[in-house]
Image: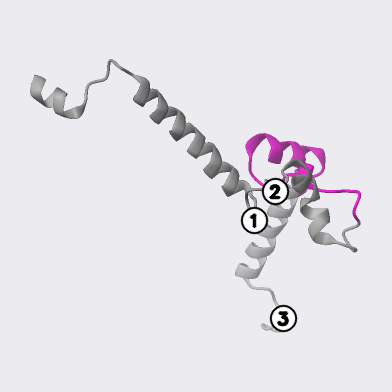
Amino acid sequence: MTPRQTPSKATLAMLAGLSVTTATFGALSGPALAKSAVTTGHGFDISNLDRAVKPTVDFYKFAIGGWLAKNPIPPEYPSWGTYHRLADKNQQALRAILDQAATNRHAKSSSKRAEDR
């Protein structure tokens, strides 16, 4: 072999690294990968798939049809997503905190607390 035909050490190291990576990710396939994604919140959640739709016909519906079925767009919103759900949940939590603070008759105003010092 001529010097140009021999693989370099960097090429061999890269191939070895790729084979280790492939073996690692190959072990996480099927139900193990799906369970991991669902329990940890990372990755792609396969429960959001709509398997009734063929991916070659309507990939968008196939990919998120399950999520769309579980999360219909509320009539008061033009669009709906995970960030909208989070914002609504935060608004409700803040409203509850403010309502509780407003009804607390034992709480002193900041000016009263300053006078007490």
Quadrant (top left, top right, bottom left, bottom right) of the C terminus? top left
Q: Nearer the viewer, mark 2 or mark 3?
A: 2
Q: Amino acid at mark 1?
A: Pro
Dot 3: few (<14), some (14–19), or many (≥20) neighbours within 10 Å?
Answer: few
User: Which numbered dot is residue 60?
Assistant: none
Instruction: Identify the element where label 3 is drawn.
Output: loop
User: Which numbered dot is residue 5?
Assistant: 3
Q: Nearer the viewer, residue 39 or 72?
A: 72
Instruction: Identify the element where label 1 is drawn.
Output: loop
Was residue 40 drawn as part of the magenta stretch in this picture? yes
The residue identified by callout 2 is: 73
Q: Quick one: label 2 or label 3, which is nearer the N terminus?
A: 3
Q: Which residue is outermost to the top?
A: 106
Do labels 2 and 1 touch, CB within 8 Å? yes
Rendered residue at 91%/57% (across/down): 54
Rendered residue at 73%/54% (across/down): 22
Q: Quick one: label 1 or label 3, which is nearer the N terminus?
A: 3
Which segment is the magenta one? 26-53
